[in-house]
Image (cartoon, grey):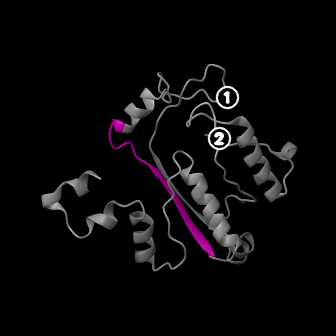
Amino acid sequence: KLLLEDLPNVDAWMGIGTAYCGVPNRISYHLNLMGPSTAVDAACASSLVAIHHGRQAIMIGESKIAIVGGVNALTGPGLTRVLDKAGAVSPEGRCLSFDDSAHGYGRGEGAAVVILKHLDSAIRDGDNIVAVLKGSAVAQDGKTNGIMAPNAKAQELVARQALQQAKVEPSTIQYVEAH
């Protein structure tokens, strides 16, 4: 955004270079990929929503392979300050997930990419399979006591939808990754 406001130095490539869609579209361009190429902006759930979209594209036959990536870069203090003012950032800078004393989260940076492929195809092609994604679901929490506050009932519902889609009994879950 700041680059585009520097009017004397604006050039023709800044639009696509600074747009959210610029990264996936540039990767698709360079790799000559012709399926869906999108950027997902769903706050801290963006990477998980992107994985869901990639899985869906494979399941409905829109794509044979999905390259799904996520990045969080703390490029300046502005957003951290806004989140702190909203009471979302922990004063200690760390999470106390599932703890009664939890009072915010600690921000961090990271980047990761996963390659999704139908299991039968991955086995046939001799791919190195590190995980099997049996189901996924996405939902918004709806109205809560604040737009950034979680809704336990809505989150339980979306978890049940993912379990049902995966045909997995909750009692068989041995590990949970949460954010």
Indicate whether residue 14 is drawn in magenta: no
Disc 2 residue type (three-letter): Ala
Indicate whether residue 68 is drawn in magenta: yes
How crowded pointer 1 is (Cα within 10 Å; few <14, some 14-19, many 20+) is rated as few
Q: Residue at x 30, y 53 (%)?
A: 1
Disc 1 residue type (three-letter): Phe
How crowded pointer 2 is (Cα within 10 Å; few <14, some 14-19, many 20+) is rated as few
Q: Residue at x 63, y 30 (%)?
A: 97
Q: Residue at x 71, y 71 (%)?
A: 59
Which disc is residue 98 wearing? 1
User: x, y (%) of residue 52?
Assistant: 64, 59
Which disc is residue 60 wearing? none
Given residues 14 and 142, the one toward you in this image is 142
Residue 127 visible in image: no
User: x, y (%) of residue 153?
Assistant: 74, 38
| Residue highlighted by disc 2 | 178
N-term mark: 2 or 1: 1
User: x, y (%) of residue 136?
Assistant: 71, 56
- Placement of 79 over or under 115, stated as above or below: above
Q: Residue at x 66, y 50 (%)?
A: 139
Horizontal arrangement in the rendering, residue 68 relative to residue 58 (left or right): left
Horizontal arrangement in the rendering, residue 49 relative to residue 29 (left or right): right
Horizontal arrangement in the rendering, residue 23 relative to residue 143 (left or right): left
The answer to whether marks 2 and 1 mark residues whose Cβ atoms lie closer than 8 Å is yes
Horizontal arrangement in the rendering, residue 76 relative to residue 118 (left or right): left
Numbered-mark total = 2
Marks 2 and 1 sit apart, C-alpha to C-alpha, by 10 Å
* SS at circle 1: loop
* SS at circle 2: loop
The region drawn magenta spans: 63-78
- Placement of 141 over or under 136, stated as above or below: above
- Where, quadrant-wise, is the C terminus in this rendering? top right
